[in-house]
Structures are given as structure tokens and as C-alpha cells.
Amino acid sequence: MLKSRTLAYDGRGNFVLNDLSQAEEAIAALGGRTLYAEKWVPFVKEVAVMVVRSRSGEVVSYPVVETVHKQNICHLVFAPLRSRDPAIAARARAVAENAVKTLKGAGVFGVEMFLMADEITSFAKFSLTIPGARVHLYGKSESRKGRKMGHVTVVADSDAQLSLRLRPLLTHLPGGHDPRELDLYAPLFPERGFSHKQSLVGVIMGSDSDLHVMLPAADILTHFKVPYELTIVSAHRTPDRLVEYARSAAARGLKVIIAGAGGAAHLPGMVAAMTALPVIGIPVKGSSLDGVDSLHSIVQMPRGIPVATVAINNGTNAGLLAVRILSAGQPELVGAMEGYLRVLETEVLGKVDKIAEVGWNTYEAAKKAQARGG
């Protein structure tokens, strides 16, 4: 609802926008005045309360009435308000009186309000706006505290996606919600540097010295909004932890494991031997042999125990491969990956145009200067 801040009365100065395409029409119809917008609400009735305020600040209200509008003009007024819930009239008067108390001046004020549907109906309608949610009402005519009126079924592609859909439902529960439930049953994505409680991808490394190689994989997963955990699992120094991690991975909800290791690089292969999940190996460049030893160790797995091996120190490709694996069951990731590839194409074509514009000698000199920080 677009409204004029001044000269608005008897339904004039209002314009209902059913679509953003009507914006220009609405602005033209309201004639260049200062405007404000209100969210449209699916009300059941319009009610009004006349409130009298004295110069000393005393406030008294008249009984609540129902107003019926026709062509944006008040058509009928029913007094007093008829409702199955006697508390509604008292609540409306309290809201109106409290509103007028915040104002300055004295006189008679008209306070208009919307009467919404009962909380159960309102919650059911809200639930239908959540992707994957289905509402099942039991057909009972009257709601009251402690009475089971229905249930909502929510489905999702992952635990993390389910949490994102469940969270707004919990916050809109009739009668309020317990804030502790939100973090327990519907946790948000954590800030960078912390693992998600409902991870789809496990990012593990044999040592904290490998962290700089694994972070690009984590950044890719963050870019695609894929929940992940990142931790240290040493094949040689913490063998029991390795066994527990690998064998519990699928049961904990992981779908892919990215494992980085240098030197003997046994971590990816040992994890692959103890889980049916796909394992992506990242050879980490060590102090000797430039990581070729790690590459050969990971890529030369025996038949029956595959590890998808990326290039030395290429955490970025490991993250991208994990997203592509997940996209087989999450179609929205296919579209996200296609968008990522379009960005890469645009970057390369921009470089093509730049070389054609300035010549490759100037282009190369500029790159070198940028690398030196000049």
C-alpha cells in the first residue's frame, strides 16, 4: 500500500500496488506528494477506536467499532465490534490508547487497525511461503491453548537447508518461541573460521601447516553456500581419530570429504578405505620434491579404493569438484556453478579486449608492475 503523508483522508491518498510494475502509475496518481509504503496484510476486518486526550495527558477511549469500506471510502460502521473473542475489543482499545499517549496535543483521535486472522490460520498461511513446507490442518473449528490443530511437514536437500527453512517457522510459532531452540534445531551458517554444525563437506588436513592450501577449498564452499567443517586429522599422529572420523562421516551427514596431505600423504587414501563417501585428495607441496611425492602417493591408489586427486596445492579445484559432486542431488548448485563459469568466461574475454586495446607489451608491463605493487 503506497500512501501520501499529507492530504490523505476517506481512502484518498492511497494506492494498492499488486505488482512493482504499477509503481509509476501509483506515483502519478498520488500527485507528487511525499509518500510512504506499508506492507499489505491479509486482514479479516478493519476496526477503529476514537480516543480522547486532555491537555493534561489523560486518555479515554470509546468502544471499538468495525468499519466497512467501499471504493476506498468508509461505507458502513458497526458499533460495537462483534467478535467471538471478547479480549479483542479490550486489546484494540489498549493499543489505541497507548498510541495516543505517545502524541502531543489534545483532542479526539481516530485510531484505525486491522483485525488479522486467528494465529493458527495466520501461521498456516505463513508456512506456505516456506519452500518445501506442506501444511496439514485437522479441520477443528476452534483453537485453544494445548489443542493440536495440525502439523507442518518440511523437506529439504540437506540438514543445513532444512534448518534454514525451519528457523522462520519456529520464530513465527503461535504463542512465541524459545530462542534456545533456534540454535539447537535450526543453526545459522557460522562466521568464517568456524565449522558448520550440519556440514555436507568435510575438509581435513594432516597438519596445521597445510591450512593455507585448504582455505581456498573452504572459500569456494562458502561462495556456493555449502556447509562444511574444517579440522586436522593426522593419519600418522592420530590414527584413532582418523578411523573414527572416516567411519562416522556418512552417519553425521557428510556427503564429500576433501583431504589434503604432504610427504607420504596417506590421509586421503586411508579415509577412502574406511568410508563409502567420495574423497577428494589435495597433494600438498612440502619442503622437498615440490609435492610430486604427495601427488604420486595420492593418485596411485590401488584398484577399488578411488581418490579423486587434484593438482598440487590446488584447494580451489578441490572445492569446485566437491560442489559439482553435490550438484547431482542439489539442482540449484548446477545453476550456481554455471554462473561461476560465466564469470570466469567474462574475466578472460575482458583480458582479450584489454590486450587488443593496449598491446601485449604494455599489458605485460602493467602486470609486472602490479605484481611488484607499483
Image (cartoon, rainbow, N blue to C red):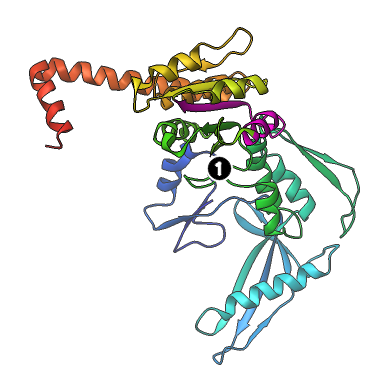
Identify the residue at the far bottom of this view.
Answer: 56
Q: Position of residue 136 (x, y in %)?
A: 83, 39
Residue 228 is left or right of residue 244, and the answer is left
The residue positioned 21% from the left and 16% from the top of the image is 352
The residue positioned 72% from the left and 33% from the top of the image is 155
Tell me if I can see residue 144 in this picture: yes
Can residue 349 be found in the magenta stretch?
Answer: no
Q: Position of residue 196 (x, y in %)?
A: 58, 42
Residue 283 is left or right of residue 167, and the answer is left
The residue positioned 16% from the left and 26% from the top of the image is 367
Q: Is residue 348 above or below residue 17?
A: above
Residue placed under numbered mark 1 in the picture: 195
| Quadrant assignment, res 277 | top right
Amino acid beneath label 1? Ser
Query: Mark 1 Cα within 10 Å, few/some/many (few <14, many 20+)?
Result: some
Magenta span of residues: 240-262
Question: Foreground: 324 or 128?
Answer: 324
Question: Foreground: 334 or 239?
Answer: 239
Q: Position of residue 21 (x, y in %)?
A: 47, 36
Q: Is residue 65 above or below residue 217?
A: below
Q: Secondary structure at mark 1?
A: loop
Question: Foreground: 130 or 37?
Answer: 130
Q: Is residue 208 above or below residue 274?
A: below
Q: Position of residue 318 (x, y in %)?
A: 47, 23
Question: Foreground: 302 or 276?
Answer: 302
Q: Is residue 361 above or below residue 186?
A: above
